Image: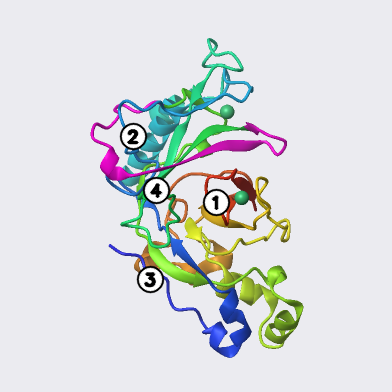
Amino acid sequence: MPRTTPPRPTDIASLFPALRPLARPATRLHPRPGTPTVHDSSVGGPLLWPVDEPWPVCEVPHKRRTGHRIADVRREREILRRAWARNPRTGPTPDETALLATFRRGRHAPHLSDTDPLPLLAVTQLYAADVPYLPLVGDTDVLQVLWCPYERHGPRYEVNVHLRWRRSADVHDTRTPQPEPPLADRPDLVPTPCVLHPEPITEYPHWEVLPAELRSQIARRWDADTYLSDLSTAPGWKLGGHIDWRLTGPTPLHCAACEAEMRPLLTVDAREWDGGSDSWIPVEDTSHARDMGANTPTDLYAGRGQLTIAVCGRNLLHPHRLISQ
Ligand SMILES: [Zn+2]
Ligand SMILES: [Zn+2]
């Protein structure tokens, strides 16, 4: 089933033509729980990875012994999913609740030193054939994103994100099973497998990024909140578009290698919609938009909820940067 964003309440660019050059294409990814294969675009699905190619590892020194077992995180979600499907009123049985209580953060990998190479966790895979506006390097046609699920890297205590572009035709034998770390810092750094329903849309800059003159023109017609919630940027997982600088306000983004302006590549969002962004609920989801978990299909919550991977506008292989809002 495709996912369709309802038309915006107003075609704002026809009222304010000065907005037109500031429009950017974005692709809402619309992840929904499913069972993706290596040949699908996915969140948390298996990656198309050649059997003879080394799997990327985290070598940044940080504690690796302590965390949540990734196997427990998946089992807990499965138990809860079945329990609530079986009994929507009471959920898990006392036995299940007792079992879930044993899935705790702990020193579950005592053999790991703080510098042992730690396999990264597959987060998303995007095929150009499925996903409009996917930025590509050379003749590649797939983007794969992995991360080290500890928010302990660099001065801002971020996850350690690794981007890999590849040509799907080059992969003959796929690596299976795929490596992954034993533990995660938090359960919500482990994605629940989702299939994607990409949909191209148009976005306009965050309120504070607009030129002052244009902002005051728009302000005569709508308040900033309406512009921010309904007319500028979409919530949820997306490619491209504009950053919603809701927490920090805009900061300049320049490539550390060449000074070029950086652009959002991928936004990993904890919620596909919430009370402030109802107008973006796809028409196919309106009837069950308030169901438990409907707006949190990936179960991820990275950074402060909305994590954008920004890349150099001139060269995708220059160092990326993470923005957390
Ligand atoms: Zn790490
Ligand atoms: Zn650059």
- Residue at the disc numbered 4: 89
Three-letter code for the amino acid on which mark 2 is drawn: Trp
Name the secondary structure under disc 4.
Answer: loop
Front one among 322 and 89: 322
Select label 2 or label 3 by which is in front: 2
Q: Which residue is mark 3?
A: 283
Residues in magenta?
152-179
Mark 4 or 3, nearer chain start? 4
Give the CA distance from mark 1 to mark 2.
23 Å
Number of the label disc, if any, that sits on residue 49:
2
Residues packed near mark 1 inside 10 Å, few (<14), some (14 to 19) or many (20 plus):
some
N-term-proximal mark, 1 vs 4 = 4
Q: Give the Cα distance between marks 4 and 3.
A: 27 Å
Seen in the picture, residue 55 relative to 213 is either above or below; the reply is: above
Amino acid type at image mark 3: Val
Q: Residues within 10 Å of mark 4 (few under 14, many from 20)?
A: few
Badge 1 residue CB within 8 Å of ligand 2: yes
Residue type at numbered disc 4: Arg
Proximity of marks 3 and 1: CB atoms separated by less than 8 Å? no
